[in-house]
Amino acid sequence: MKKHVIILLAGFVFAIFSNYSPVAAESAKMEPATHHYTLKRTQHAIHVDGRLDEAVWKAAEPVRLSAKNGGEPEQATTVRMLWDQHYIYFAFDCVDSHIWSTMKKRDEPLYNEEVVEVFIDADGDGTTYLELEVNPLGTLWDGYIFNTEERRVGILAWNSLDIRWAVHLDGTLNERSDNDKGWSAELALPLTDIYTAPNMPPRAGDRWRLNLYRIDLPDGAGKPGEGSAWSPVSGRTFHDPDRFGEVIFSDEVVK
Ligand SMILES: [Ca+2]
Ligand SMILES: [Ca+2]
Ligand SMILES: [Ca+2]
């Protein structure tokens, strides 16, 4: 699987990869995941419109994001995940009294504003993983991350060709004079974008390290806000693969 990554990133980070071997990846010891999620299949099409009104979403197991200390965040976020033969699906449901974001171009630094995020380290090497972000304007950030003790590189020039995503707002964007209810984001990520997956298509029982995040900034950029996570991270950064949770692929069909 590593050779696919090398092909993908050849040239841009060749110097880094030239020191990188599968042996090193296998010997890297990840901390075991503390949070697990059984990823069930859907046999019903999911209309990726940002509205989480499909019966299969209602039936999917929810997870709640936690504050940094593991406690309840100021504003709740519920996430559900499903898969089928082509995609892995994510549904973020964000309670939000003030929905705010300004960035409209793909791969802008959405993480400086309000956003939801997915990190996927399919081979669990703690080094190479996919990062996705969607903001309330429906702007996408997608890229591959190469994260070692020495440096962290984000290959944001990588774009998923077939990803589908959408948001739905229950409130008014960037309007302080009223109280919003929240916003939701729906993503369908092609499984074939996950170059580091041990099996493609995944098999029942496959385990991918993965984490889910949200940034809420009620007072805008640069002001105190809240980062929440499915599997809480240890420090300031979300780029903490040792703390990623784990999804377990299942052939069980969600009803
Ligand atoms: Ca939908
Ligand atoms: Ca907000
Ligand atoms: Ca990109």
Image (cartoon, rainbow, N blue to C red):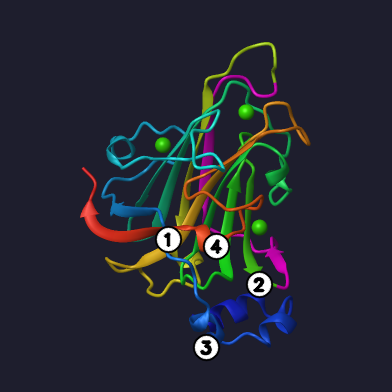
Q: Residues within 10 Å of mark 1 (few under 14, many from 20)?
A: some
Which residue carries the number 1 mark? Answer: 33
Residue that carries the numbered disc 4 in the rendered image: 241
First in sequence: mark 4 or mark 1? 1
Foreground: 229 or 59?
229
Q: What amino acid is labelled 3 in the image?
A: Val
Number of on-image labels: 4
Give the residue type at disc 1: Ala
In three-dimensional space, the C-alpha distance between marks 2 and 3, rounded to whole angstroms, equals: 15 Å
The residue located at (73%, 39%) in the rendering is 103
Where 58 falls versus 231 (above or below)? Answer: above
Pointer 2 with pointer 3, Cβ within 8 A: no
133 in relation to 99, above or below = below
Q: Which residue is mark 3?
A: 23
Among numbered discs 2 and 3, the one appearing first in the sequence: 3
Q: Are marks 4 and 1 in contact (CB under 8 Å)?
A: no
Q: Which residue lies at the image location 65% right of the left edge and 64% below the top edge?
A: 158
Per the image, the residue denoted by label 2 is 148
Could you tell me if the residues under marks 2 and 1 are in contact, i.e. CB atoms within 8 Å? no
Mark 4 beta carbon near ligand 3 (under 8 Å): no
Q: Is residue 205 left or right of residue 9?
A: left
Mark 3 or mark 4, earlier in chain? 3
Residue type at mark 4? Pro
Q: Are marks 2 and 4 in contact (CB under 8 Å)?
A: no
Q: Position of residue 162 (x, y in %)?
A: 52, 57
Magenta highlight on residue 233 = no
**Classed neighbour count for the residue bearing mark 4: other residues with Cα under 10 Å, few (<14), some (14–19), many (≥20):** many
Q: Nearer the viewer, residue 137 or 61?
A: 61
What residue type is disc 2 on?
A: Thr
Distance of label 3 from label 4 (alpha carbons): 19 Å
